[in-house]
Image (spheres, rainbow, N blue to C red):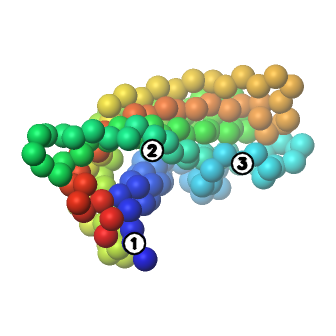
Amino acid sequence: MAITREDYVTQSVDKYLRRILAEKGYTDDTFEIIPSFPHDRFDDTPLDKNYVATGFSFDDGGRSAEMGSNLKHRLYTIEFFVIGMTDVWAKNLAQGVKFALENDQIIPLLDITVMPSLPVIDALVVASVSAEHQPIAKPKPWQENIWTVHARIEDTYDAAAAIS
């Protein structure tokens, strides 16, 4: 099975998010990372913990990084949807992700084929990051406290090696 550059990026971002939230003191009993926005996951009851869902957009298309080479430069847009038990929880988690990305300025790109060590093979550069509250008209209880963090991540790589 081929592993694409986007697979490396997706899993590296997930591991990074888990690590930074753990380093900030968030524990498994207070939040859970889920793979996508939970449109149908919750019913009309309040949440029992906080959730962070990651969404990816790979639609930039990339461009040549330098003439005469296989180097590509791609801009990924990553959205972290923070669904909080309260607005304080949601805002705090969203700001924690935002400030960690701003502070670190890079996300280590991991070799996901080497488990469990996951050696760092490259780095993704954080170009910009912002956080905002998402008001929803007539929200269900789980939709009352949603924030998003928008990160634009730059990646320069050898296009010939984008699938392994």
Residue nearest the observer in this picture, 62 or 86? 62
Residue type beneath disc 1: Ala
Mark found first going from the N terminus, 3 or 1: 1
- State whether residue 105 appears in this view: yes
Mark 2 burial class by Cα count in 10 Å: few <14, some 14-19, many 20+: few
Amino acid type, residue under disc 2 in the picture: Phe
Which residue does the image show at 72% across and 48% down from the upper left?
38
According to the image, label 2 marks what residue? 58
Q: Position of residue 161 (x, y in %)?
A: 24, 62
Q: At 21% from the left edge and 40% from the top edge, which residue is drawn?
A: 64
Q: Earlier in the sequence, mark 1 or mark 2?
A: 1
Rounded to the nearest angstrom, the CA distance separating label 3 from label 2 is 20 Å
Q: Residue furthest front?
A: 68
Closer mark to the observer between disc 3 and disc 2: 2
Q: Secondary structure at mark 1?
A: loop
Residue at horizontal 49%, vertical 32%?
150
Kind of residue indicated by mark 3: Pro
Which residue is under mark 3? 38
Q: CA distance from mark 1 to mark 2?
A: 18 Å
Q: Is residue 31 visible?
A: no
SS assignment at label 3: loop
Q: Which residue is mark 1?
A: 2
Image spot of residue 59 (x, y percent): 45, 40
Residue at disc 2, secondary structure: loop
**Near-viewer residue (158 or 146):** 158
For the N terminus, the quadrant is: bottom left
Numbered marks: total: 3
Which quadrant is the C terminus positioned in?
bottom left
